[in-house]
Structure formats: structure tokens, C-alpha cells
Image: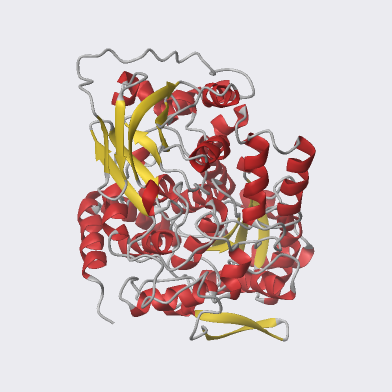
Amino acid sequence: MTLHSVLRRTTAAIEARSAGSRAAYLARLARMRDAGRGRGKIGCANLAHGVAACPADDKAALVAGEAPNLAIVTAYNDMLSAHQPFEAYPAILKAAARQAGAVAQVAGGVPAMCDGVTQGRTGMEMSLFSRDAIAMGAAVALSHDIFDAALYLGVCDKIVPGLVMGALSFGHLPAVFVPAGPMTSGLGNDEKSRVRQAYAEGKATRAQLLAAESAAYHGPGTCTFYGTANSNQLLMEAMGLHVPGAAFANPGTPLRAAFTRAAARRAADLARAKGPGIGEMLDARSWANAIVALLATGGSTNHTIHLIAMARAAGIELAWDDFDALSRAVPLLARVYPNGKADVNHFAAAGGVPFLIRELIGGGLLHADVATVAGEGLGAYAREAALDGEGLIWREAPAVSGDPDVLRPLAAPFDAQGGIRILAGNLGRAVAKISAVAPAHRLIEAPARVFDDQADLLAAFDAGRLTGDFVAVVRFQGPRANGMPELHKLTPPLSVLQDRGQRVALVTDGRMSGASGKVLAAIHLSPEGAAAGPIARLRDGDIVRLDAEAGTLDAVADLTGRAPAAFDPARGAEGWGRELFAVFRAATGPADEGATILPRAGT
């Protein structure tokens, strides 16, 4: 199949933009590779420390230098439902590694926080920064430099992007990512949203709300809506970093256990063959594939930040223009909540990742000839995994979607274009997720209601002051202001107002949840208010126009002569651990450059 012209042009633009930084990155990996992998280059005392606690057989194999040593970098904790299954993974991986003639050691752990717990709370102000902290933690784990490959255990929002960034800092080593899978389906997403809106209107009690939330989030595994965590898993497949098909098998099943064992075996094979490291494997085509997969499924807006930061760690310079160009060419093939009623289990049952990748490859919308941990091109991910005893076999993906309300072929998409738009105008540049926004709500021109904190907007809603049509402007929420928290708590009240017939939208330099919903939102606005961006000059009553179809975001007023509203950097700078992240707030880049402290390669 001939490559789609937009994919070809966009990939070429990424390659050209990244030429210098990619060359510098690959030169760094060459120096690391030339220095040698594993135990042979270190002193006896160093090696003795590294193997002191190993079982006798593992110790003998490592000292003899015969067995590949696999680093396990884990984001296990049992507060995150998605990460609780990882408690048992090290033992499984170690046993599978031994059977494959290798040794596996837990090299280190990284932090993993739950955005579901911290929504609307102070901890959310550290959420985005945790991504770069996770990257640092992964690098610390690998700094012992006695490993031949690595296994990365992570699922959720900032954790997988951070692990990828950390892995790329040791990009000469092969890497396999090991997921835990989604929890089984609970309370339907429509009913969960209905109760949330009823609570926001005072028509449901807190006890009723908690009962609904507990029925939706009820056991081990990833939350089943298609937010950032499940977008992570889809991207790991599309980038060839999983054992093919591993993303959406439920925890505690024989199939999930088979995927976990296979990950250890694959890492051992790659280490023994001295196959390409993750940094060499992920070239511009791999990152273009990730954007396409995100767009084709209406995935998380958070990845308009994360993918840029992740790619930078590989010397690849992505830009919002790449998302916008591809979104105009990539059709929407999946409807999973919040841009549909189904959850990820329904998506997987309808054909899931193998069906999706086969369709996109067939339409020339994915580079099929990329390197993957499967040892072949992306076509390996267009096959469906199944159990054969305790092992895995792969067969062709279903020819027909099991549910055309959830997953469709390229010939009959839900929408001819992808789910993300880049908006630009005199207010700056922003991201909008439109896959869940009805066409009638994709354009709004209305007076601004300006808030400096999400709590102030919620208070105005509770007091009944949000009347008429308006654009809610919530500023001083960018990375340099307060860590760019998600503002998902604003979704229920704004949805209530929209359902009442008011025309409403949101403009913010903060983030919305990866499960951005049915209200039009221009998010990640850059430059941010704390950097004296135009949003800091808006006042109540200024007319703001958002047009998601045309890709425009403007104030219908001349803002040039106004002084920006003052931002107090001391506000929210201390307490609940925030003082520890002062260096992040000072050093992080803008949202459209990944909101990361990571410099470009070679700088």
C-alpha cells in the first residue's frame, strides 16, 4: 500500500526539523554502546555489590557473564488500581527470564500518582511534573550500568511517558514495556456521567455519587474509559514497544500472565542478539505512527504534550503542527468513552488494536516498516494474540468489526478527520479535542467570564452566577504557574449548563483530563498567563470566539494596550510537597514544547 501523502510529508518535516538533535542523540548512544553493555566492564567490587543478594544460580550466571541481565523498572504501588497487579510481576518475570537463560533484577522503582485521586486537589499541581521525575527515577535505576536490556512496568497517565523518557536516556539498551491491562467493565460510562451531573445540580447525594464511582472503578486494572492511561497502552502497541496484543488483556487472566512471561523472553532475546536499543528503534516514523494512532481513536489530549516530551528524549522534535496536519487526514475509527458509550473492553472485543492497525496500514496511514520489539515490522501488531496452552500464538485480526458502533473500518469511519484540532489566533495556540463534541457546539462566540482558579468557577456555578452564554477563561494554570493541573472537575458543571441550553466553552492554559468530554475546550493555551500571555489581558465581558472546525481562537477586542493581570508566583508554591518542585516550575518549557525540563539533544 502506498503511503498517504500527508503522512509522508509530515514525517519528512519531522525528520528535517530533527536532523541536528537526532544526530546528536544517536552520537551519544554510539558512545554508550561503544563503552560496552553489562558486567564485563566493571570492577570486581562493583559487580559483587550488584549480585550480592541474587540467588546462587543467578549469581553464578551473572558472574560468569553468560546470561543477559534484565533490569526491571517498576511503577508498582497498590493505591493505583492499574498498578496493583505489578506486585506479582517481578517473580513472574524472573522465572520467565531464567527459563530463557537470562537473569532479571528489580533495578528500581519510580513514583506513580493517580490523577483520579488528585483531581481538583493540590496534589494535581505535581502531576505533570511527576512525568519528568519518573524519567529521572528510571535513569537512576539504570545508572548501575550492569544491564543488557530493560523491562518497564507502567500503565497510567504520566508514568508511561516518564518511563519512555527514562528508557531513552539509556537508549542503547533494548526495552520492552509490560502493561497490566484494564479492569473488567463496571457501571456504564453514560450512567456514571449522569450521576456526576446530577450531583453537580444537587439532585444526587454524595452517597449516591460515591456508589456510582465505586461501581465504575471497582477492582484491579486500568480505569476502563479511554483517557490517558489507555491511550498510553494503545501508543505502546503502535510504537512497537509491547509484546504484540498485550495492551488490553484483563489482569489476573491466563492471557495476561502469558503476555508477561513473553515480555521477559523477548527482552532476553533482544539482549542476547544485541538488537537495537529503544533509542535507535524509535525514529521519526515511529513517532508519526504514534500521532496517527492517537488521532484515529480520539485519544487523550495529554499526548499533545507527552509525545512531544517523549520524542525530544530521542532527539526527535515534534510540533503541534504535526498533530494538526495529520488530524486533517486521519479518520476517526473508534468511539470509546468519552467520545462514545463503550469502554476499552468493548473496544478490544470489537477487534481492538489489531483491527485498527491493520486498517491504518492498509490505508497507508502507518509506517509498517519500522523496527519493533517483536523483531519485525508493525504488521506483527495487526495480528490477534491467543493462548496455545500456556504460550501465545498470533492469528489474523478479525476481518469485520465485532461492533461497528465502537470500531469501524477505514472505508466507513465515524468521521473523515481525527479527533484533535490545534487552534491559533490572537490569544495564542491551544489544543481542542472535538471527537466528543457535537458539531453544533464546535463554534462559540460569547463574553468571557474570567477566573484565576478553578475553585472560583465552581463557586460561581454553585451560587448560580453562571448565566447566559459565556466562555469560561481559567488562567494561571500553566506549567510555570502551578504545574498545569488537569481541570476535569469543571466538566460536570459546564456540561450541566450546556444541557440547559446555554452555549458554553472553556479556554485555559491548564490541562483538561485525558477524558475530555462534550464541552468545547481550548486547552494547553500557549503562551501561558504566568508568562504574560494574551490570556492574562482578558477581562470579563470581552468577546471570545472559538471555531474548532476552522482552527481559530481569538478575542474580538484589541488587547495590545492592556497590562496583563498580575500573577503571584508565591501563590500555591508551598505545602503538600509543592516547594520541592520549585525548580520544575522555574525551568519547564511551554506546553507546545512538551512542558518538560528536558533540553533538546545537543544543547
Q: Report x, y in % for residue 187.
A: 71, 57
Please give the count of numbered marks on the rendered protein: 0
- Give residue 226's quadrant in the image: bottom right
Q: Is residue 319 visible?
A: no
Q: Quadrant of residue 7?
A: bottom left
Q: In x, y percent, where is residue 14?
A: 25, 56
Q: Position of residue 289 (x, y in %)?
A: 37, 64
Front one among 485 and 130: 485
Could you tell whether 11 is left or right of 265 in the image?
left
Q: Residue at x 52, y 84 (%)?
A: 398
Task: Give the color scheme: rainbow, by chain, secondary structure or one colour.
Answer: secondary structure
When the figure is inspected, residue 578 is found, relative to residue 243, above or below; the finding is above
Residue 341 is at least partly visible in this image: yes
Location of the N terminus by quadrant is bottom left
* Residue 182 horizontal side relative to residue 324, left or right: right
Q: Position of residue 51 (x, y in %)?
A: 70, 55
Residue at the (36%, 60%) spot, across then down = 418
Front one among 492 and 1: 492
Q: Is residue 190 above or below residue 250?
A: above
* 259 is higher (above) or lower (below) than 321: below
Name the foreground residue: 34 vs 107.
Answer: 107
Classify the position of the C terminus by image quarter: top left
Q: Which residue is at a point 38% across and 12% down the rendered structure image?
A: 566
Q: Quadrant of residue 371?
A: bottom left
55 is higher (above) or lower (below) than 563: below
